[in-house]
Amino acid sequence: MKAVRQTTLREQIAVSGVGVHSGVPVTLIIHPADADTGIVFSRSDEQGREREVRADYRSVTATELATVLGDHSGILCSTAEHVLAALRGLGVDNALVELDGPEVPIMDGSAAPFVAAIDQVGLVSLNAPRRFIKVLKPVRVAKGEAFGELSPYASGFRLEIEINFDNPLIGRQSIATDLEPDSFRRELSRARTFGFMKDVSALWSAGKALGAGFENTVVMSESRVLNAEGLRFSDEFVRHKALDAVGDLALAGAPLLGLYRSVRGGHKLNHAVLTALMSDPTAWIMVEAEPVRRMRGHADLATGLVAPAYGPDVS
């Protein structure tokens, strides 16, 4: 929590690829944005009219295989979670994400290409205090053996993610990490999306996974990983689930101060827990980072302290 001022990109960046589900080529440009803009997605329709949707939990229209954003006019873009994870993981508060297609490009199946592009231009601080959403009490959503919970945590934002697949290549895996830019780059950003060969025909029939391939997805049979290069981590599967959670929870609209624990979760559960938190005005409060105060004859005080700013908007 060292940054006390809001941030944005120093310069715009651009990446190109295909949508993992649509198979459609797309270019994504991330522009710097002013303080208090937040993360906004923009796309022009077939008539050349530009639409914008704020990256907000209320803008989620579907969570079946990816996080889909839209509004009353319909879907704006699909598979937003990886670029959102990169922005939140690196501490980018304000950005305009412009697309020329219906889906964020899958790139290599992870957030690493977005991270590399952001790191190449770097970030700048803006003349506005950074705001955080501080979790005040536990909020839990459960369905069968799956559950997710946001609870208070004194040291920033922490993820504790567990998965359990009935497949010997995955089985039960867990990861716990405090989210900071360095830990995000090292532990989560390179973990790729994954799928099973046995599901391919059904997905194709449903018009999904049309852009999936060995270059952007970890593909498994019942007994082995089919990608020639193998896994990037022995527990890459749970690391990717944690990566998805970072992106999905970025839809809070500000960095969270709390602990997120998920067991057998996914996009749907992540969104349900975040919605439950934000819908309870007693469960969170918006806080502001305190400015650094210089004291004569003393060293600079530690940065990153947070002080209450205002409560949740319940209007």
Image: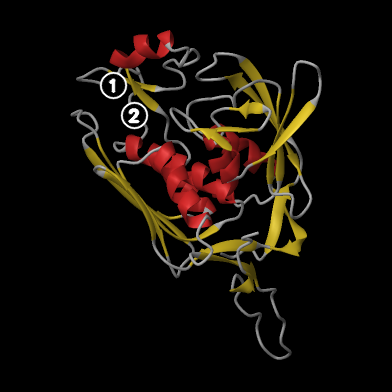
Amino acid carrying label 1: it is Val
Vertical side of 18 occupied by 315: above or below? below
Question: Furthest-right residue in view?
Answer: 48
Q: Quadrant of the N terminus?
A: bottom right
Of 264 and 179, which appears nearest the observer? Answer: 264
- Residue closest to the eye, 62 or 20: 62
202 sits to left or right of 125: left
Question: What percent of the width, then of the height, locates residue 174?
Answer: 28, 46
Determine which quarter of the picture holds residue 47.
top right
Q: Amino acid at mark 2?
A: Leu
Q: Is residue 79 visible?
A: yes
The image shows residue 288, relative to residue 14, as above or below, that is below
**Callout 1 environment at 10 Å: few (<14), some (14 to 19), or many (20+)?**
some
Tags 1 and 2 touching, CB below 8 Å: yes
Q: Residue at x 59, y 62 (%)?
A: 132
Whether residue 161 appears in this view of the structure is no
Give the SS element for disc 2: loop
Question: Which residue ends up furthest to the front in the rendered image?
Answer: 315
**Residue at which label 2 appears:** 231
Return the mark for residue 225: 1
x%, y% of residue 290? 66, 74
* Mark nearer the N terminus (1 vs 2): 1
User: Where residue 144 sits in the image (x, y, percent)?
Assistant: 25, 42
Picture quarter with the C terminus: bottom right
